[in-house]
Image (cartoon, rainbow, N blue to C red):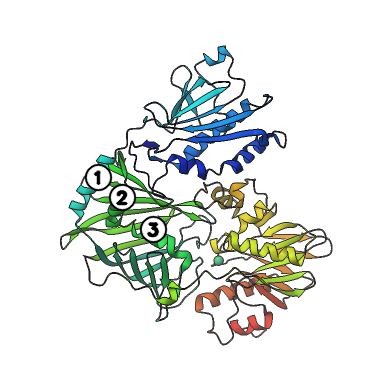
Amino acid sequence: MILVSHKLDIRRNRAIYLPYFVENTNASFRMFFFLRSLQMPRGYGLQIMFQAELAQGLPQVMADRVQLQQVLMNLMINGIDAMKDVDGVRELTINARWTKKEQVSVSDTGVGLPPQQADQTTVPVVRKAGLQYRPLQRGVFSSELGISGGVMAAKHGIKLVLLLALLAGVASAQDAKTAIQNAQKAMGDVKSIRYSGTGKAGGLGQNWNPTTTWHPTVITNYTRTIDYASRSSREELTRVQENPPARGGEAPFDGEQKQVNLVSGQYAWNQPGNAPQPAIAAADERQLQIWLTPHGFLSAAAENNALTKTGKESGKKVSVLSFMIGKNKVTGDIDDQNLVTKVDTWIPHPVLGDMLVETTYSDYKDFNGIKFPTHIVQKEGGFATLDLTVTNAQANVQNASLQVPDAVRQATAPPVRVVSQKMADGVWFLGGGTHNSVLIEFKDYVAVVEAPNNEARSDAVIAEVKRLVPAKPIKYLINTHHHFDHSGGVRTYVAAGATIITNEGNKALYEQAWNQPRTLDPDRLSQNPRKATFITFKDKYVLTDGNRSLELYKTQRDNHNEFLTFGYLPKEKILIEADDFTPPAPNGPAPVPIAQAFGNNLYDNLQRLKIDVVAIAPLHGNVSSMSEMRKVLGKSS
Ligand SMILES: [Zn+2]
């Protein structure tokens, strides 16, 4: 859907506007990519003059960035293609200006269309990316996206004019203002809010298998306080396990677990006890979450010049508002009672790409003059992360703004560190962070077990691998299970050309997730796409060069993850395992019952397979041994 407003109010990072858009397509890089995908001779691209002529004072354009980018890139590919046979100057010009008729044009200095083709109703303007175009009238095309355009003769070649047209209805800034004001009137003037209730939490990416819901826990107590003016939020919750505990991931806990998650402006921190713990990586999302709440959505919509159009939700007419907060697009529905019923946004995720965050608000009630939903469901990546029944809400509470602790204000993100430890000839334990990897050297290549967290972690691990074994390529990456903290760095290895070895139960998830758009935080694979190659197995797989072998087994009947793999080096008697056994820290507490049960299951699998383990390379915690595992689990032999 392309929406155009005629407003000339352009503010940095508030909305996509054309110069911003074109700059952010990273033109030189994309050009290179397209030339490669067209299989043109090396160096061809260097002779093309690429020009973007962008008029001053362009209007704001509310658009789906990916779709717009695709169409524009299609036109560019087409122009480049048309100049294949041109000697001399090859010039591709992107021109953006505002008249009543056109906004963006892409012209080239190719040979132009033969006259008979220019007369045909369908012009083969788009060949890539599978967008469907249909002719409107002679020489004019339109797309499903509500973009229309035409072809006209340019000086030498063809000029493709992209009209960001209003096929799907005009979005109006004026209507948006009215909708926001009506909703604010109906929902009450709220400068700060505190709401509380009970419900269910879902651990994102911690489901038992890739198709079950996120790992559920029970929220016995939930209170959130938000101060909109100071952009601060304090979320307090107490969780307990389901009875019996649900299968799946997350760090196991016993009894009640209290969490206090805070954000104020750009600073985020946790404060489960007295000492604040900086949570730098969580700051962007927590800040954005403030504007996803019903009243927060309305103030953000007003502040960010929302546009609106009419839509339908469950068969009823709603006003759909959309706007940008920084690089995040936000859309939301206001129903015929002037209540906010739904807010969507997208945030970057290492596994899922641009991850949809959808929040629905229903069963509104009057709480002392303000309206607030008594049911809130937030889904991330398709499953609920929060399902809250609200029992109380109070507006304009005292002392809602937060004081940022000095320790939080001064905190900097810890460097990504990899500390390697040799366990045997050609076997290294790669620790130094929250999650470990293991490097195994084979005759002509190396294999790495586990790519946790994200690309930054993978980059650091790969750098250490190259330092330890400079002459051999990383041919295989073994992934133990799909939990996102264990799979967030896998794409980096795909980009580096490695084959992924994982249980057959995980492949569909990765293929599907890795196909999603990744515009908010592009990684190496999205910038340089290639198809992932997999080796999958059901119960057992052996990687061998004839001398060294790595055996991979599915952990049968595992409650942490249905398709959990552990690895075994028979010669070295080393076990490589994730999450079923994490050696306690020195003088640390014994594992809680859930963790103990995971450990027992791993132990049973080792017994069943008659696997003789001496050393353990756990993918959390320090290098351990079978005798320590026996001791921790209370096994006599
Ligand atoms: Zn896990």
The circle on residue 301 is 2
Dot 3 lies on which element?
helix
In the rendered view, tell whether residue 36 sits above or below residue 199. Answer: above
> Considering the numbered disc 2 on the image, is that residue within a helix, a strand or a loop?
helix
Which residue is situated farthest in the left direction here?
Answer: 369
Would you identify the image quadrant in which residue 217 lies?
A: bottom left
| Extreme-top residue of the structure | 116
User: Could you tell me the amino acid type at mark 3?
Assistant: Leu
- Sequence-wise, which precedes: disc 1 or disc 2? 1
Kindly identify which residue carries mark 3: 288
Q: Position of residue 35 (x, y in %)?
A: 65, 36
- Classify mark 1: residues with Cα within 10 Å, few (<14), some (14-19) or many (20+): some
Residue 293: x, y in percent? 31, 57
Q: Which residue: 58% across, 31% down?
A: 92
Q: Is residue 47 left or right of residue 595?
A: right
Q: Quadrant of residue 502?
A: bottom right
Residue 419 vs 528, above or below: the answer is below
Residue under the image location 36 percent in, 47 percent down: 323
Q: Is residue 317 visible?
A: no
| Residue count near mark 3 (Cα–Cα under 10 Å), binned few <14, some 14–19, many ≥20 | many
Residue at position x 44%, y 18% in the image: 137
Instruction: Kindly identify which residue carries mark 1.
Output: 177
Alpha-carbon distance for marks 1 and 2?
9 Å
Amino acid identity at mark 2: Ala
The residue shown at (62%, 20%) is: 111
In primary-sequence order, the first of circles 2 and 3 is 3
Q: Residue furthest front?
A: 56
